[in-house]
Amino acid sequence: MMYLGINIGETTFGKSLKDGASAILTDSLRLRSIAEERITRVKAIGGYKNSLKSILKEENFNNEIINSITQTSYCDIIIQDNEAKVDGLNKTIPIYSISHHFSHALTSFALSGFEKAIIVIWDCGGNIINMNSSDSFDKWWKHGREQHTYYLVSKNNIEVIDKDFSEPFEMGFGEIYRALTHLLGFNSYIHSSKAMSLTAYGDATKYTHKELFYFIDGKIYSNLKYTRKDNYSLLVEWANENFGLTLKKVRTGEKPSQDLLDFAAYIQNSMENVAIQKIDYLINKYGIHNICIGGGVGLNCVMNSKIRRKSKLKNLFIPPASGDTGQAVGNAIFGFYMKNKVIPNLSKFDVFMGSNIAIHQNLLDRFKSYFYLQLSFQEKIVIGAFLLNKGLIIGWCQDKSEWGPRALGNRSILCRTDLPSVAKKLREEI
């Protein structure tokens, strides 16, 4: 049997979604997943059609039986289950729809290899879980929605044990970090990793008399409410009211002020402190020291490192694609779970589960001229090192692509960033 997982590219009210992907999982535990951007070469693009076509072609899907399709979305209610026909198969396929955070939880647990675990999903926002009066879906912050969800999981059972920031207008880790990312001059939450990097240039200890996040009786709270779409301005106002800071949104070509960098470091530090308190609270309550972290905030490696060092956990697992491109895998896992009544142990997964280099051959047509060299791997290493030393930028492409946003050697841009001219070209052109 084959189970498909897909990320929907558009909400029921027509909002385009990012971070599309597709995945397949078989009863023999063969797992493949490709982000839509890997095929279309459009950063963080949503949907699944191109990636799904690529997977099915590579896997020769006509020799497999497709048992189910599972889909997820966000900033929207959970779409109802239905049925559909797949090209080439004379049968109707069940289509399951599951919650955004449930999918993240399945991904995190199945790949961890743990027998039991507490799953921590920290996210910018998943599905709407209750409607607030007659407000439209496009103002998702006016509704209760998934932001922080906590699960207790074993291979036969998964249950929600707690939630934070599930009421209308509340701002959890992901929402506030998205606001910070915009304040630092980036036009989308997909650049949150750059915002995280910039926090290293600030001094969080300058602001100690009031916390942005706080922890009381097992719950995380923040001092901000999402009252308008340009949520970065809420940070500006709060910083002025509480610390007397005059902050401005960074514009293209500008550098952030030191005050802004210090404030960014303060947000990062405040988030880290309550994250550790929450995890320790859950460990004490349930007596389980295996922790999985999923959702987009799971890509905050600075916070993860601090949690690993300072919390009471014994084992920590974070999927390489803990953000939304990893949803497709969680969706495929759900199909397996529905049929077999057990969450599969995929701890031996290969992080290189994406598209094969052969499908990108047509990209060479973009160049006016190119040539091939038949080289051994050692010869490629030597020539690559020579070209890097000369200040050239290399696109290194081999075998299947990585699952997740980290370049691990199969799809990597290599260069010498200690050379100012190279750093400038990388930043402005590539």
Image: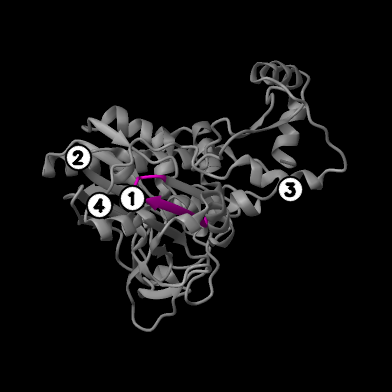
Q: Secondary structure at mark 2?
A: loop
Residue 150 numbered mark, or none = 4
Question: Residue shown at 87%/43% (left/top)?
Answer: 368
Q: Are marks 4 and 1 in contact (CB under 8 Å)?
A: no
What residue type is disc 2 on? Answer: Glu
| Distance in Å between CA atoms under marks 3 and 4 | 44 Å
Q: Are marks 1 and 2 in contact (CB under 8 Å)?
A: no
Q: Which residues are magenta?
A: 19-30
Q: Residue furthest right?
A: 368
Q: Is residue 28 magenta?
A: yes
| Distance in Å between CA atoms under marks 1 and 2 | 20 Å
Foreground label between 2 and 3: 3
Q: Which residue is mark 3?
A: 362
Circle 1 residues within 10 Å: few <14, some 14–19, many ≥20: few
The answer to whether any part of residue 25 appears in the image is: yes
Foreground label between 1 and 2: 1
Q: Percent from the top left, x then y, of residue 243?
A: 43, 46
Q: Which residue is mark 2?
A: 115
Indicate which disc, 1 or 2, sits on the residue closer to the N terminus.
Answer: 1
Q: Secondary structure at mark 3?
A: helix
Q: Quadrant of the C terminus?
A: top right
Foreground label between 4 and 1: 1
